[in-house]
Image: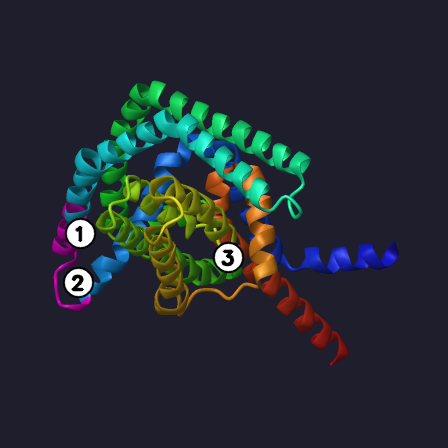
Amino acid sequence: MSIFINWLRQRLADTELVMLITSLLVIFLLLVLLVPVLAPLLLAIALAYVLDGVIELMTRCRLPRMLAIGLTVGGALLLLLFALLAVLPLLTEQIGRLATHAPQYMQSLRDTLHQLQANYAEWINPDYLQQIIAGATDKMQEWGGALFKFSIASIPGMITLLVYAVLVPVLVFFLLKDKQLIMSWAQQFLPRERTLLQRVWRELDIQIGNYIRGKFWEAFIIGCAMWVVYWWMGHDYALLLGVLTGLSVWIPFVGMAVVTVPVILLSYFQWGWSDTMAYGLLAYVIVQAIDANVIVPWLFSEIVNLHPIAIIVAILMFGSLWGIVGVIIAIPMAALVKSVVSIILERRHGAVGSESG
């Protein structure tokens, strides 16, 4: 016990480290309490990181910053308008079509499983097959109910979406325009001993900026590629699968595994066991391979290096805390934890070295 008390006293004697941990705990508690209220601001900050990369590229081409901000925000607003007027109605129509045809698709899947059992009776247990069919039926009914509720609740959802469509661009514009002013104002609320906090912030600003920008463009490229390929092949749910594939890149490892299931099922419902289905799945595999071997190394050359186990643990922890938002920000939060732990270990080794010297 005395060893722990001595260790604790040594840590508390490090004023800067105590200030760093205290400040991070306060910020974390504020996020936990105010995430629902601050959701538009957090979304605006993420979009500001994305657009700031485009603005920096324009300023390197000797374009005035204010003009670069105006052109970038104007282009983003045009893309948002296109998404609201063209993409969102098409996506809603495809979700409604899927909800309508869900019972028919479920019956087709049930018939296929029974046919497999009849052809391979010696390999497939009938009781186990019935459990699979019952579980799949319940899951499809659950998804269908969720889609139906989504369509019923679309009016308030659209109102919220319109509020975000107005509020978030305004926040993004001022975050980009007054970036330095906001940073200077925020520093007034930080402790005076903030050398370590500034160090952590500089590291995270680079890492999180690269991560958000990289994930955004990766999701955009992969989602559009899947949409275009499946649209060209005549898939009824091309946009829906493109959106699901784009969203899946925000959840490392798990996202690709989860989205593969609807890709296979909807391709089967669309084309059956045919060459077209095989070509569609081959296209999906090629897009994922290009993503893993070309796009990710290109976009994430400077991203923080985290072990896969650390990434999965972060997804589980922050996902249970904040849901889908926690899953999306799991890697930046894990990078923050890694940075703080590195500082603690560094100062511990420094203290041990000074004592031994």
**Rendered image: mark on residue 72:** 1
Between circles 1 and 3, the one closer to the viewer is: 1
Give the CA separation, mark 1 to mark 3: 31 Å
Q: Is residue 235 visible?
A: yes
Q: Is residue 190 visible?
A: no
Q: Looking at the rendering, in which quadrant would you find the C terminus?
A: bottom right
Q: Residues within 10 Å of mark 2 (few under 14, many from 20)?
A: some
Label 2 sits on residue: 58
Residue 157 percent location from the top left of the image: 33, 24
**Rendered image: mark on residue 197:** 3
Residue nearest the viewer, comparing 218 with 95: 95
Magenta-drawn segment: 60-74
Residue drawn at (58%, 53%) of the image = 312
In this view, which residue lies farthest toward the right? 1
Amino acid type at mark 2: Met
Give the CA separation, mark 1 to mark 2: 9 Å
Q: Image quarter for residue 342? A: bottom right
Q: Earlier in the sequence, mark 1 or mark 3?
A: 1
